[in-house]
Image (spheres, helix red, strand yellow):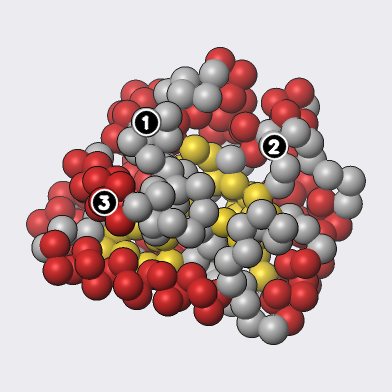
Amino acid sequence: MVDIHCHLLPGIDDGPPTLEAALALANALVADGMLHVVCTPHIFPGRFENRRSSIQDEFERFAGVLEAAGLPLALSWAAEVRLTHEVLDLLAVGEIPFLGPSDGLSTMLLEMPDGQVPLGAERFAQRLLQMGVRPVIVHPERNRGVMERPDKLRAFVEDGCLVQITAGSLVGQFGANAQRVAQLLVDKGWVHVVASDAHNLAGRKPRMADASKMIAQQWGAATARQLTVFAPAAMCGADLSEYGADFQALSG
């Protein structure tokens, strides 16, 4: 599988606090079935003051350690960007990293506050699209406003945004409401990708294997492969063909 949303870099946000913890999480990701992981620390002005330039430095350091450890895990990097007015300023100076291109647009993970869909959020997303940036709305099933009214997500999807739900939500890790809404969004066809959003090995460990199994049982194996392998690979430019037999088995 390919994971486009994971807090793997050590000491940079609320993910692993140490290099040892990050290596333990990386091993857990491999055990959970990951071939490629995108490291996506928070960019959240006022809380996590990360920028493209600083994330790149931390990524290169960690990637070197991972390569030396011989762990069979391909890495790339982007960020989980909080919906704030500073985002436009950071975009203007090239300090927002993207997952990759999507139909000619640059794809960016966009996080809304947990408690609501802010007034003006759709207009903000439309502005990003006009600027050539396609938002991927992350974990909306854990947003209280979407929990109360899942149809709030419709306009974002119709405008051209993509949607990522969390693997743990599908298997009940974030409670019954988040699980119900996650499953409803898959039913509606509004989910484009499933990701781990893993932070640690305690309450935020990878659950992608469990989620993929559930998706295959409820919506079919082809949907499971699309949401956990092919769609995320396309979003971040992961070359699955390099995995040889593993890729051939998935394609078959």
- Residue under numbered circle 1: 202
Q: CA distance from mark 1 to mark 2?
A: 21 Å
Query: Where's residue 216, x and y in %?
Result: 34, 30
Tell me, yes or no, if residue 190 can be seen here: yes
Classify residue 227 as left or right of residue 187.
left
Q: Residue at x 46, y 24 (%)?
A: 173
Classify residue 164 as left or right of residue 34.
right
- Residue under numbered circle 2: 114
Classify residue 159 as left or right of residue 94.
right
Q: Secondary structure at mark 1?
A: loop
Query: Where's residue 16, x and y in %?
Result: 39, 48
Q: Nearer the viewer, residue 243 or 173?
A: 173
Q: Residues within 10 Å of mark 1 (few under 14, many from 20)?
A: few
Q: Earlier in the sequence, mark 3 or mark 1?
A: 3
Q: Earlier in the sequence, mark 1 or mark 2?
A: 2
Q: Mark 3 against mark 1, which lies toward the viewer?
A: 3
Q: Secondary structure at mark 2?
A: loop
Q: Which mark is residue 20?
A: 3
- Mark 3 is on which residue type? Glu
Query: Where's residue 167, x and y in %?
Result: 43, 35
Query: Where's residue 187, x and y in %?
Result: 56, 29
Classify residue 103 as left or right of residue 150.
left
